[in-house]
Image: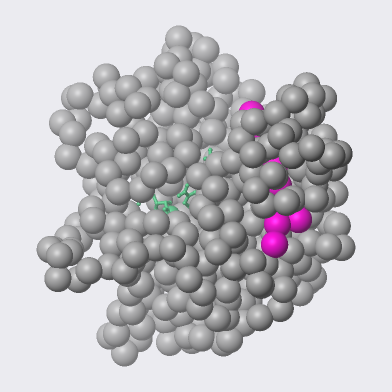
Amino acid sequence: MKFQQLCVLGSTGSIGESTLDVVLRHPETMAVYALSAYSRIEELAEQALVTKAKVVVVPTEQARTRFRQAWAGGGAGPEIRIGAQALVDTVLDAEVTTVMAAIVGAAGLPSALAAAQAGKRVLLANKEALVAAGGLFMRTVRENGAELLPIDSEHNAIFQCMPQTGRATAPTQPAAGVRRLLLTASGGPFRTTALDKLAGVTPDQACAHPNWSMGRKISVDSATMLNKGLEVIEAHWLFAMPVQRIQVVIHPQSMVHSMVEYEDGSILAQLGQPDMRTPIAYGLGFPERISSGVGLLELTTLGRLDFEEPNFERFPCLRLSFDALKTGQAACVALNAANEIAVDRFLKQQIRYTEIAPVIETCLERITGLPYTALDSLDDVLALDARTRDIANELCLLKT
Ligand SMILES: NC(=O)C1=CN([C@@H]2O[C@H](COP(=O)(O)OP(=O)(O)OC[C@H]3O[C@@H](n4cnc5c(N)ncnc54)[C@H](OP(=O)(O)O)[C@@H]3O)[C@@H](O)[C@H]2O)C=CC1
Ligand SMILES: CC(=O)[C@@H](O)[C@H](O)COP(=O)(O)O
Ligand SMILES: [Mn+2]
């Protein structure tokens, strides 16, 4: 395997930490070049010490001071770069072969896109980048010969079950012989909660995912199933699959990570423990298999595997996501941006859980009612994203 030098964007998050865990198991084939954090600066200093990172990226001058105070390694320590542009610049450094895009939200789009533009190996966890700019992102991967490996567990499972070409590609049409993609969803913590109780659920209850340990934003998205909606859009772009050929199946055990249905009636599934180190190791090792630290799935103690239809009344955000994908790119940008604001306000207890979907729906109506906006460039996407955030913030303020 060629030696890899990693830039881990969002290293202090759940995916970032799992990535470092896997990387440190393989010192002979990979090393950390750069790390980035936003608020957890002391954790970043600790990570930089352990991984011997050459560069760290922090958001502000104050964060740089905090990093210096927290640095326990003696000497000058890693080079400290500041701000969103530094994320992009660091990805472009010649030393970097591989970028783990694990910043949460559309804030991760510019750096993930820069990695694709620079033709790097891109391990994409940041699904919001594809939701907001799927066409642009996939075109950029193709035109620059980048290698795009999906890290999101469902997409990684689908990638593993696809006809194997031996290399990661950004297809322009569905793989031959594939009929449908079957995306599994846990149903989150409120799968069986009485509908009239949902208005009173707390952020901590929404973040208590039954199977996965994740950051708070994606945990709320799993509860509303907006996460699955984002993943439908992500699958559409990654695998060039029309929306009509993507099915969501609730699978409460989260052991089958997703499936590919073929024309001959076969269904191929990927199973494993709900631990993101498996897809991360797959992406890092591709096309080889490397150890991840994840234990094996003991089939005899697994018990049963259940599958059921999602209910749009319980999960209106899933319906809104399908609608957005059918409507077009502007709707997808708006869906994602409105959701980021609504979830943030819910986590701060400024709106109720049941107000997340109405905020998104109203934003979608307002944005898709505007004259057609071309979304051919990163600036176009970011402008529409910002406009939607203003609308969503106004709507949330009306509800407080
Ligand atoms: N967690 C999981 O199991 C999975 C996650 N994903 C996706 O991966 C991405 C990361 O998720 P997760 O690790 O759970 O999230 P976390 O919230 O745990 O981590 C997010 C990371 O992004 C950084 N960050 C937050 N805001 C900004 C910003 N504005 N600019 C730069 N950096 C920022 C955080 O820094 P700091 O912590 O220092 O504030 C942190 O390092 C998301 O897109 C998610 O949807 C996909 C599949 C599974
Ligand atoms: C681990 C991962 O990939 C998450 O996106 C996970 O899928 C969330 O679980 P849900 O199926 O509940 O959305
Ligand atoms: Mn997922």
Horizontal relation, residue 255 to residue 365: left or right: left
**Quarter containing ligand 1?**
top right
Q: Nearer the viewer, residue 321 or 154?
A: 154
Is 79 a magenta residue? no
Residue at 62% of width from left, 82% of height from top? Answer: 167
The structure residue drawn at horizontal position 37% and vertical position 20%, both measured from the top left corner, is 352
Residue 66 to residue 88: above or below: above
Regarding residue 313, the answer to whether it shows in the image is: no
| Residue 290 visible within the image | yes
Residue drawn at x 28%, y 23% is: 201
Q: Nearer the viewer, residue 80 or 203?
A: 80
Measured as percent of width and height from the top left, residue 103 is found at 62, 44
Q: Which residues are magenta?
A: 31-39
On the image, the x and y values in percent for residue 231 come to 46, 55
At x 58% / y 54%, what residue is drawn? 20
Quadrant position of residue 160: bottom left
264 up-or-down from 132: above or below: below
Quarter of the picture containing the C terminus is: top left
